[in-house]
Image (spheres, rainbow, N blue to C red):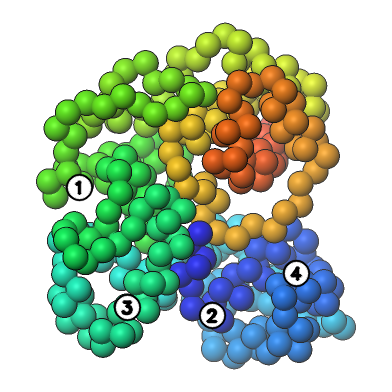
Amino acid sequence: MFDTLLEKQDKIIFHLFQYLQKKNPCPLKEVSTQLNLSSKSLSRYVKLWQQSRNHDSTGVSFSIKNQVIEAIYSHENAQLFLSSLLNRSDSFKLLVKIIENPFDTFKSLEKRFYLSRATLQRRVQKMKPLLSNYNLWVSFTTTPTLKGEEIQIRYFSLLVSLLYDPPFELNAQNLYDRYKEVQQYRITQGFSFYRSIQAPGKYYPVPFQINDFGLLFLWQQFTGLENLWLEPFLTEAVDFSLYAHTKLKEITLLSLSQRFHRLHSFCDFYSGSLLLAYEPLFLTNEIKQLTYSFIKLLPNYRQLLIKHPELPVLYEKLLQYSTQKEKNKWNLLG
């Protein structure tokens, strides 16, 4: 995932922050163990972070008192923290350039970044696990440099775009518009679909051919701007599972059910983790029961879970979001 591109110190600080988002404050020993560091080493990294004034530029700082560590941040700074750190990463900057200029040669990148051959090779090597997760790879023997299926390259380019230049607000329309920009940029670079292809997927068998126009409509469905055309038994199975294993109100469950369908359909269509970085696992029994229910009721769900093992973590996020919306609505009414 994208945190693999971070410099060593930034990566440790980011993983610390991710853990503290789940449990803040936290005993220093507990989080040190989770990060495979000694308490002394972690304290040193935190001290270096504070001394370098990084907390001024990112809005994220840490305090250690009586062997307890606490993260201090705003919601807005938390949302942008990964982007802030990635934009300091030399490997991420290189990845951005490879996407922007797919016909750059190894030699031209050496000159652009003022790097030796060995240093550039190390940075390319650092990208490989991330790219592999999305079924992509980099090769300079032939152009374009970034290789793989065009559908996957556009999806991956969207993720890089969102991390490199995060939108002020990420909603359905903004996400669709950004994808449309990425797709149009790829087309102007010469990567059009010259013939339609059959869409992959078993959970949501896309009922139309995939080409440039078809992909735009599919992204309208994935973002919720258009409805998905699902079989009734799928909607019934998800509705039943949510009703049985969550405590949300019925009106909330209706909109949540649509989000689950869009998530499953998206994961069916694309490869590569939807979690952009390390996430500590704190799965509730509610989520475990929900996942087990999907295994029993949804056809091809086991294969979907193997392809996207991050799904239960995403369910947790969806439920937290819906619960928070319910609370806010109650506060407004009260």
Task: Identify whether 242 is placed above or below 126.
Answer: above
Closer to the eye: label 3 or 1: 3
The CA distance from mark 4 to mark 2 is 16 Å
Instruction: Name the kind of residue labelled 2 in the image.
Output: Lys
Q: Residue furthest top?
A: 232
Q: Position of residue 30 (x, y in %)?
A: 82, 72
The CA distance from mark 1 to mark 4 is 41 Å
Q: Is residue 13 left or right of residue 98?
A: right
Question: Residue 34 got which mark?
Answer: 4
Q: Position of residue 122 (x, y in %)?
A: 37, 79
Instruction: Name the kind of residue labelled 4 in the image.
Output: Gln
Neighbours of disc 1 within 10 Å: few (<14), some (14-19), many (20+): some
Q: Say whether disc 3 or disc 1 marks the residue closer to the N-terminus.
A: 3
Q: Position of residue 72 (x, y in %)?
A: 68, 70
Name the residue nearer the viewer: 25 or 334. Answer: 25
Q: Residue furthest right?
A: 66
Location of residue 269 (image quadrant): top left
Location of residue 175 (image quadrant): top left
Neighbours of disc 3 within 10 Å: few (<14), some (14-19), many (20+): few
Q: Say whether disc 1 or disc 2 marks the residue closer to the N-terminus.
A: 2
Q: Say whether disc 4 or disc 2 marks the residue closer to the N-terminus.
A: 2
Secondary structure of the residue carrying tag 3 is helix
Residue marked by disc 1? 185
Name the residue nearer the viewer: 110 or 24. Answer: 110
Residue marked by disc 2? 8
Task: Identify whether 104 is placed above or below 50.
Answer: above
Secondary structure of the residue carrying tag 4 is helix
Q: Say whether disc 3 or disc 2 marks the residue closer to the N-terminus.
A: 2
